[in-house]
Image (cartoon, helix red, strand yellow):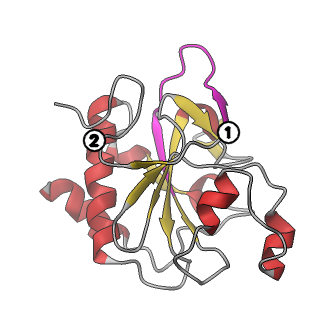
Amino acid sequence: MSCIDQNGWLSRAVCVNSPNYDERPPQCEPSLLVVHNISLPPGEYGGPWVDDLFCNRLDASVHPYFREIASLRVSSHLLILRDGEVRQYVSFDRRAWHAGQSCFKGRNRCNDFSIGIELEGCDDEPYEEAQYRQLAEVTLDIQSRYPAISADRIVGHCDIAPQRKTDPGPAFDWACFRALLRRD
């Protein structure tokens, strides 16, 4: 039995509805998974700031960095916290606004056909074992629902927007993640 319901929501995720999504183009099923990282403020973990950013309620007065990003309208399908908790902002069947200007194998606008997963972290700090385990489990669930997302269609944000993005960064252990996918 799938852990993703008929509306594209992961049953074990905490649901935090973001308004920052729209419909995918007609007949456009997810066929790419993009791994990101995020921490707000940069390098700090915990707190409500990612939820607030994805829900357009980030208070610019709380931190100087927030003044730069508070007006952004962005989201992701999922966020995996340091302890492995999963939060879902947008149904997998909808287009979350996570990749921006991007290209995969000559196809632009990756948001149209991708699912975005944020890991709470930053480029140069190791991710937690709980995050890798949860990312592998979620990826397998997603692949069972969206079979076009094959192993070679799981990429980092840096792979689809290399001129402007570096995440999930050199601290992300792709070999560990791929080994967990094979083992599960």
Which comes before the other along the chain, label 1 or label 2? 1
- Residue found 31% across the figure and 34% down from its top: 4
Residue 54 at x, y percent in the picture: 65, 53
Task: Compute the Cα span from label 1 to label 2.
Answer: 24 Å
Residue 93 at x, y percent in the picture: 49, 28
Disc 2 residue type? Asp
Does the segment drawn in magenta span residue 109? no
Callout 1: SS: loop
Around disc 2, counting alpha carbons within 10 Å, would you say few (fewer than 14), some (14 to 19), or many (20 or more)?
some
Q: From this viewpoint, is residue 91 visible?
A: yes
Check the image and report above or below for 114 versus 167: above
Question: On the rendered image, what quadrant is the N terminus found in?
Answer: top left
Question: Which numbered disc covers residue 120?
Answer: none
Residue 116 at x, y percent in the picture: 52, 48
Q: From this viewpoint, is residue 175 visible?
A: no
From the viewer's side, name the closer residue of 15 and 123. Answer: 15
Q: Quadrant of residue 175?
A: bottom left
Task: Find disc 1 in the rendering and name its residue.
Answer: 19
Check the image and report above or below for 33 versus 40: above
Task: Find disc 2 in the rendering and name its residue.
Answer: 141
Callout 2: SS: helix
Q: In the image, is 170 to the left or to the right of 42? A: left
Report the mark closest to the observer, 1 or 2: 1
Q: In the image, is 83 to the left or to the right of 121? A: left
Stretch of the chain drawn in magenta = 20-35
Disc 1 residue type? Pro
